[in-house]
Image (tube, grey):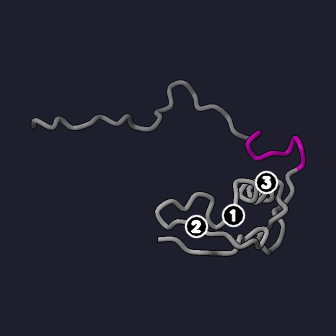
Amino acid sequence: MSGSSLCVLCGRSFVYDSKDLGFFPFCSARCKGVDLANWVTEEYRFPGSPAPYVAAGNSPAQNLRPLPEDAEGPEEFEPEDEGS
């Protein structure tokens, strides 16, 4: 079954096949790529307060220390015998 829709990026009308949605809800690979680039470059943003800025050299990850060698790590997974 096919249908028609408007591209969510450029507004162009296009026809799609419900068995092969392809680039839906976009009309082309170009519009799909432009939309992805807008997310990656933060052109699109969710409303709300901006995240707090972490100054270079003041990352919480810098405060992490390796575990001592004798520290116990996560338990290893041992599968049960299916024949039991």
Residue at horizontal 59 percent and vertical 32 percent from the top: 67
Q: Residues within 10 Å of mark 1 (few under 14, many from 20)?
A: many
Residue 59 shown in magenta: yes
* Quadrant containing the C terminus in the rendered view: top left
What is the total number of numbered labels drawn onto the structure image?
3
Give the numbered dot on residue 16. 2
Magenta segment boundaries in residue numbering: 55-62
Looking at the rendered structure, the kind of residue marked 3 is Ala
Which residue is tagged 3? 37
Q: Secondary structure at mark 2?
A: strand
Looking at the rendered structure, the kind of residue marked 1 is Cys
Give the numbered dot on residue 27. 1
Pointer 3 or 1: first along the chain: 1
Q: Residues within 10 Å of mark 2 (few under 14, many from 20)?
A: some
Disc 2 + disc 3, Cβ < 8 Å: no
Pointer 2 or 3: first along the chain: 2
Looking at the rendered structure, the kind of residue marked 2 is Tyr
Q: Residue furthest right?
A: 55
Q: Is residue 83 above or below residue 6?
A: above
Q: Is residue 12 above or below residue 55?
A: below
Residue at horizontal 79 percent and vertical 75 percent from the top: 47
Q: Residues within 10 Å of mark 3 (few under 14, many from 20)?
A: few
Apparent side of residue 51 relative to residue 82 in the rendered image (left or right): right
Of discs 3 and 1, which sits in the foreground? 1
